[in-house]
Amino acid sequence: MTLFSPLTLGSLTLKNRIVMAPMTRSRAGVDAVPSSMAAEYYASRASGGLLITEGTGASAMAMGYARTPGIYSPQQIEAWKSVTSAVHHAGGAIFLQLMHVGRISHAANRTIPDAPVAPSAIRAAGQMWTDAQGMQPNDMPRALELSEIPQVVSEFSQATRNALEAGFDGVELHAASGYLPNQFLATGSNHRTDAYGGPVENRIRFVVETLQAMIQAAGAPQRVGMKVSPGMQFNDIHDQDPIATHLALVNAINGMNVAYLHVMRAGIGAEDAIRKSYSGTLLLGGGFQKAEASEALATGRADAIVFGASYLANPDLVERFKQDAPLNTPDQETFYTPGPKGYLDYPTLAL
Ligand SMILES: Cc1cc2nc3c(=O)[nH]c(=O)nc-3n(C[C@H](O)[C@H](O)[C@H](O)COP(=O)(O)O)c2cc1C
């Protein structure tokens, strides 16, 4: 298997095994409507086998960052339609990453007055950017009532229906990087004593139920994927035993026949344990260069490789890999700044 071998994903045939990682780019406009630049940004990267969008809010409650998009209003759905049609026109496939920030949020970035919600009322250490007030500590969250959890799950169902209406090929549940689903998984952020906290079979419950609800809303498991990042401590996430937690989760989803499990590796070797236990398609990302990616596919460590910063900086990453051409360097200064600079102006190879 090579980076250029096709891959079957349900009814989709990916033309290669190079996947664009979900990346927040903070270019959305008022009311969390994706920017009109997004169609060109994604379509110019459509030569990858699969593109995964930036984390996108499932509801107003799910939002926490400046200038990130949602998929809960008619205007947002309309704007996403121009992205999916541009990508499809360019021959690509695209999944929307569905995100709920949970306790990683600040009031200045929200459109509703409600405090952010989390498994437990434990503030995440760290700060985030707000356009109005600069860097601010994460807000103190309120613990979700047991009776409220079905509503949060149903927001993911509705957002899944909205994403399919907008023309996406599927949706990815963002259960990585310290956001709400990951907050339920981890012992440091989940101190609940009900059916959603305590032993691992309870801590995985929110993620499993959300995934099931998304599958039902999508009408086919092959339109749903999930991202995890076992061992990653970003956003103050700490778990006593991340490998055991994620193996329990893998076990619970093994029979679901979802499109893929996407693992972002974080230096604890969880990806190899997951590869052994997971029966479905595995996408693997986190710091890959071409040589290591090719080797990971050749040795069967993954079915496709996910590229983040390198894909951000190289719209024609696939062609550059084919030609062994040098890569543009990602400019961190413009990862999250508004406007086209660092978004639409990375050069492609001269024809
Ligand atoms: C600018 C930027 C924004 C990111 N935003 C997201 C996001 O919205 N959702 C997500 O799951 N991961 C996000 N990530 C993480 C990437 O998906 C990926 O896992 C990570 O960059 C590691 O891959 P790499 O070493 O190839 O860049 C982001 C990464 C970057 C560089």
Image (spheres, rainbow, N blue to C red):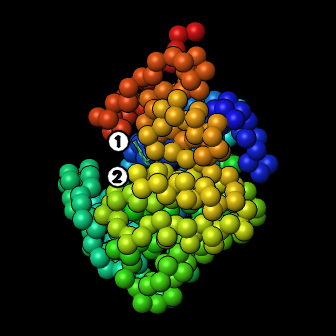
The answer to whether residue 36 is above or below residue 273 is: above
Write the residue at 41% across / 42% down. Answer: 25
How dense is the environment of label 1, judged by Cα within 10 Å: few (below 14), some, or many (20 and up)? some
Mark 2 to mark 1 CA distance (whole Å) = 9 Å
- Pinpoint residue 86: horizontal percent, then vertical percent: 64, 35
Write the residue at 33% across / 39% down. Answer: 337
| The residue carrying mark 1 has its beta carbon less than 8 Å from ligand 1 | yes
Classify residue 259 by image quadrant: bottom right
| The residue carrying mark 2 has its beta carbon less than 8 Å from ligand 1 | no
Q: Secondary structure at mark 2?
A: loop
Q: Secondary structure at mark 1?
A: loop
Seen in the image, is 319 located left or right of residue 4? left
Q: Which residue is mark 2?
A: 66
Q: Are marks 2 and 1 in contact (CB under 8 Å)?
A: yes
Q: Earlier in the sequence, mark 2 or mark 1?
A: 2
Q: Of residues 258 and 70, which is closer to you in this image?
A: 258
Seen in the image, is 220 located left or right of residue 76? right
**Can the viewer see residue 101 in this picture?**
no
Seen in the image, is 208 located left or right of residue 185? right
Write the residue at 42% across / 70% down. Answer: 241
Q: Which residue is mark 1?
A: 336
How dense is the environment of label 2, judged by Cα within 10 Å: few (below 14), some, or many (20 and up)? many
Q: Nearer the viewer, mark 2 or mark 1?
A: 1
Write the residue at 45% across / 60% down. Answer: 230
Q: The residue under label 1 is which amino acid type?
A: Tyr
- Pinpoint residue 271: horizontal percent, then vertical percent: 53, 54
